[in-house]
Image: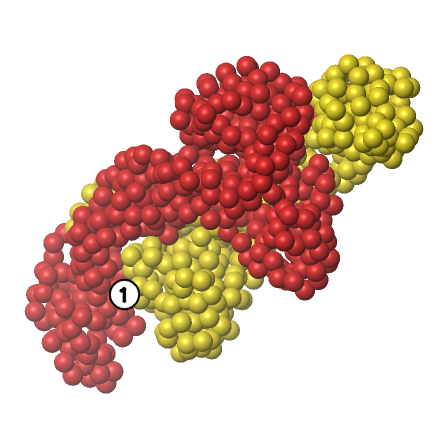
Chain colours: A yellow, B red
Amino acid sequence: MRVARAGGYACRVLTFDEYQQRVLASARPLPAERRPVAEVANLLGLVTAEPVHSSVSLPGFTNSAMDGYAVWSADLRGATPDTPVVLPVAGDIPAGDTRSLELAPGSCWRIMTGAPLPTGADAVVQVELTDGGLEEVRLREAVPAGTALRHRGEDVQPGDEVLPAGTRLQPRHVPVLLSSGVGEISVFPRPRVAIVSTGDELVAPGEPAGHGQVVDSNGPMLGALARECGFDVAAVCRSGDSPEALLATVQELTGAADLIVTSGGVSAGAFEPVKLAFTGSDDFEFVQVAMQPGKPQGFGTVSGTPVFALPGNPVSSLVSFLLLVAPAARVLAGRDPEVPTVEAAVAEHWTSPPGRQQFARVVFDEDGRMVRPIGGQGSHVLGGLAGSQALAIVPAGTTEVAVGETLRVIPLDGLA
Amino acid sequence: MRVARAGGYACRVLTFDEYQQRVLASARPLPAERRPVAEVANLLGLVTAEPVHSSVSLPGFTNSAMDGYAVWSADLRGATPDTPVVLPVAGDIPAGDTRSLELAPGSCWRIMTGAPLPTGADAVVQVELTDGGLEEVRLREAVPAGTALRHRGEDVQPGDEVLPAGTRLQPRHVPVLLSSGVGEISVFPRPRVAIVSTGDELVAPGEPAGHGQVVDSNGPMLGALARECGFDVAAVCRSGDSPEALLATVQELTGAADLIVTSGGVSAGAFEPVKLAFTGSDDFEFVQVAMQPGKPQGFGTVSGTPVFALPGNPVSSLVSFLLLVAPAARVLAGRDPEVPTVEAAVAEHWTSPPGRQQFARVVFDEDGRMVRPIGGQGSHVLGGLAGSQALAIVPAGTTEVAVGETLRVIPLDGLA
């Protein structure tokens, strides 16, 4: 760790890994909540805080795996295509038949897939091995007991764990969850993220930007990232260059958000509202991080709520959100903080600043295995940001990124 | 193509590829709509139907890339740490300053990052190369014209294409979209998908399942899949075993949905409401597809709306949705129909039925490069479905899946 002096503020320079570990160190999952299973659409993406145990058998009753005839297998002994066994058909058992039926020896029931097996039957003969008769049926093949049955409880027994703790709920978990007879489950709630863009230069989206003004695109972008990453967006708002107003806004948001993100106002200038609002607090720290983009960073807590003070330009904000905020918010959600990466080879040379870990905007070649830089690495280049498909991670020790080298890259599609 | 006869219905057997091509053949993007850019949160995930051209310059005005002093570079000729140039400071220009200021020769302005450059200035000296003076400042280094400036229009010029047609809008597109001065853009709307589970055996989620009954988990699962894949869910409803009631339900849904999915009621049994409702229509076809799971399939149109009739068990429904419905709905959304796959090696032997393309439930090994089967391949096994992480694609010609073989697999996380 080195100590640097920039613009009148004493700042420590941390490596990216040191800083990421620091902001994750105090992150803990939010208190778990019990939620009704029947409202499963609201549970998707959440993580189970406790294992889910079935209270029922699945299937709940022994049923037919085929359309055919429910029989006592001993009745079919010796049946062949040339010497079929002929049985009277007691009736139809469709799926959803709630009657408790019995099979009389020497008879059969026509039965549909999923319909409950009548007591006394021990097999189903599929319709293709019969003449499909309705009054009586010719059965052309003997079948062993158990044929074409799904036995009560063969998939799940009462008390079985059907989902372990730590499962992030996906569509494929819905059937077992809804079928397990459980009314409520315990999950970590979705973290509520609030966004505050700062700066007197900002005007709202849709308003014209006059001389000296820019449209606030950071707030909506960070809100979109938060949603894309699976978090709730508690607020997207703006604050000017008044540290007092910013502090009041942040304090108010602590009641509605589990995590607050500010953008802008953290560098070395004279009017840095975020830095002015929180410098001096024991619970807040401004540092320089050996990363590009995203060098000036602030992190702390206000009334116990974590606050990330990100640099203000859009590229720095996006990179800082993905690499620092999203991992911390995933921990709040009971998820793995890790940022997913894939490997790719470098298709075109570029440079990286000495001593800083670079997150370079890149595009994939057609097969998705090679990357090349896009849009220059100036962090205000909106066109290049829009055109990029991934962030390539260049280690701090590398200044020349050579063709053919392999890098880890963070795809920007499918952040969820 | 072979012709099979199953359960009294003449059915063609198609290969999976033949059938997938058939259901995609008539799919076209929905009519494009114009939407306000300011409501950008509603645009995310949608695809641009036309290119977006900026109506403004970005940056909109030449501004400072650093905190420092705006100067006329010629005034600093010969400045060194030992022989600094001293200039009077005309005042501060913070970011967001909307005044049109001028630089008098032989003076300077203190200027912040992003603040508009005063007329007459041609460079910014970063604060670290000065004594930071407020009345007058000692500038310790000569800088060439253009230093630390972001020129009006250097990122984007009026009329520049900032997003091509066919862009699926992501958070990284938000800054350029909001900054480009464009009020509305043309996008393909999000397809509205309606789901109808069929069968007298179904009870609503949250209701107890009696003898012969099962909880309808398919409807909520298919709804969850639709949402996860980026579509709107117009309805999730149930219909019993009455073909007339089903037909009425589907006809009503054509007013609210761009695509309708039914589950169940398509196999060889006696009470198959979906088959009974649509068989005989010129616009509907029931086929057998050489795939496992998912063999019985129906597809057609009702009042011009595409209807997918999927088999009823949850695993078959999920596989059919991902491989057939989702690609078609992506075409409606202007997206690429392709189902994303990755490569993985087989870690444990399993078998596949002869002549059918298998979509086998598998889990990844820890490094994500090898897969093994899970949960048996019986399509009613809910526990195995919940525990699976991907579908491995086994070609129709393969019956023994050998250790070490490489397969394409469809990851079940991150379907968006």
Q: What residue is shown at x 27% (from left), y 41% (from top)?
A: B185
User: Is residue B212 something that shows in the picture?
Assistant: no
**Horizontally, is A67 left or right of A76 in the view?**
left
Name the foreground residue: B143 vs A376.
A376
Q: Counting other residues with Cα less than 10 Å from the Cα at mark 1, is it few (<14), some (14-19), or many (20 or more)?
A: many
Q: Residue B4: which quarter of the image?
A: top right
Name the foreground residue: B378 vs A39.
B378
Q: What residue is shown at x 75% (from left), y 19% (from top)?
A: A133
Q: Which chain is indicated by disc 1?
A: B
In the rendered image, residue B357, in percent from the top left (x then y), is placed at 61, 48
Q: Is residue B338 above or below residue B154?
A: above
User: Is residue A133 something that shows in the picture?
Assistant: yes
Quadrant the N terminus of chain B occupies: top right
In the rendered image, residue A234, in percent from the top left (x then y), is placed at 46, 38
Q: Secondary structure at mark 1?
A: loop
**Horizontally, is B282 left or right of B109 in the view?**
right
Number of callouts in the render? 1
Q: Which residue is mark 1?
A: B66
Q: What residue is shown at x 61% (from left), y 27% (from top)?
A: B9
Name the foreground residue: A90 vs A374.
A90
Q: Is residue A255 above or below residue A263?
A: above
Q: Amino acid at mark 1?
A: Met
**Horizontally, is A119 left or right of B248 in the view?**
right
Q: Is residue A212 above or below residue B324?
A: below
The residue positioned farthest toward the left in the image shown: B105
The residue positioned farthest toward the bottom in the image shown: B82
Q: What residue is shown at x 40% (from left), y 64% (from top)?
A: A365
**Horizontally, is B149 left or right of A257 in the view?**
left
Q: Is residue B75 above or below residue A172?
A: below
